Image (cartoon, helix red, strand yellow):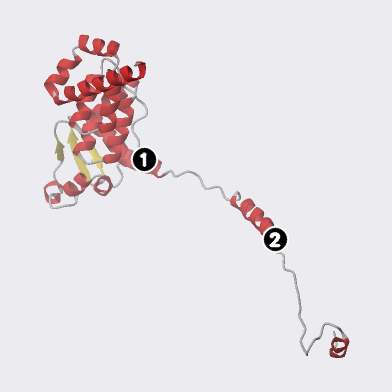
Amino acid sequence: MRWADLEKSEHLKVDRFTIRCDITIANKLYKERRRAAYGLVKVPPSDLHQHLGELLASKQGADVTFHVGGETFRAHRYILASRSPVFQAELLGPMRESHAAAVVEIQDMEAQVFQALLEFVYTDALPQDMTREEDAVICQHLLVVADRYSMDRLKLVCEDRLCRHINVASVAIILALAEQHRCHGLKEACLQFLVSPAVLNAVAAAEGFDHLANTCPSVLKDLIFKLTDCRLDIWGKTG
């Protein structure tokens, strides 16, 4: 617009004029294009556990040897140390010199249990090729091992698996383990299983209470309190 035309127009007032413009932001279109871009790249799940499992199996670069239950195992001290503060102290701390050249002897552990421990250290998972009975037994042993090596996640995994193996034949043994190794969730699962009169009679017939009395008699007091609470709760609802 020419200045002469602007002076003649009604828009110019006291040598001033106002310009108005409307701006539209296509936010919806931008978001839709951004969402569409998200699907263009597919990131596969992490396979780190697979690679570390292959490293354990190949023993390539292994720098520490263990002798357990009559068998020899090769492993990598830095991987073990990263997963367990106990292994860290033994293999990288002041105790390292004693394990630098000699074979590390581990007492009171079966070879199958140590193999399962190594698999968990490298892959963060327990062996899959086990029967239900084998799984129940190995998890009992690994629970003790997890406590020994301060591996909290392994301990919780074993607790969770053992909760699924509670039955009349196993509840006394599992309850004793839970009490001895401070597994509160597993202990509560055992006590809840035992509140049924039919289950109590069956466990008593299988001499399960004798095992508890010999290994950790204090847990019997907890069982009595649990039974009393359940009876009071039932009476309160029926009354």
Which mark is first along the chain, 2 or 1?
2
Q: Nearer the viewer, residue 200 or 64?
A: 200
Pinpoint residue 174: horizontal percent, then vertical percent: 24, 24
Report the amino acid beneath label 1.
Answer: Glu
Report the amino acid beneath label 2.
Answer: Ala
Q: Who's the residue at 19% across and 37% down the image? A: 148
Q: Which numbered marker is on residue 54? A: 1
Residue 18 appears left or right of 154: right
Q: Name the residue under label 2.
A: 26
For the residue labelled by badge 2, is the local secondary structure a helix, a strand or a loop?
Answer: loop
For the residue labelled by badge 1, is the local secondary structure a helix, a strand or a loop?
Answer: helix
Residue count near mark 1 (Cα–Cα under 10 Å), binned few <14, some 14–19, many ≥20: some
193 is higher (above) or lower (below) than 77: above
Quadrant in the picture for residue 228: top left
Pinpoint residue 123: horizontal percent, then vertical percent: 35, 40
The answer to whether one can see residue 99 in this image is: yes
* Foreground disc of the pair 1, 2: 2
Q: Which image quarter holds the N terminus?
A: bottom right
Pinpoint residue 173: horizontal percent, then vertical percent: 21, 21
Q: Who's the residue at 35% across and 43% down the image? A: 52
Q: Who's the residue at 14% across and 37% down the image? A: 105
Q: Nearer the viewer, residue 154 or 199?
A: 199
Q: Which image quarter holds the C terminus?
A: top left
Quadrant in the picture for residue 231: top left
Residue 178 appears left or right of 123: left
Residue 225 appears left or right of 153: left
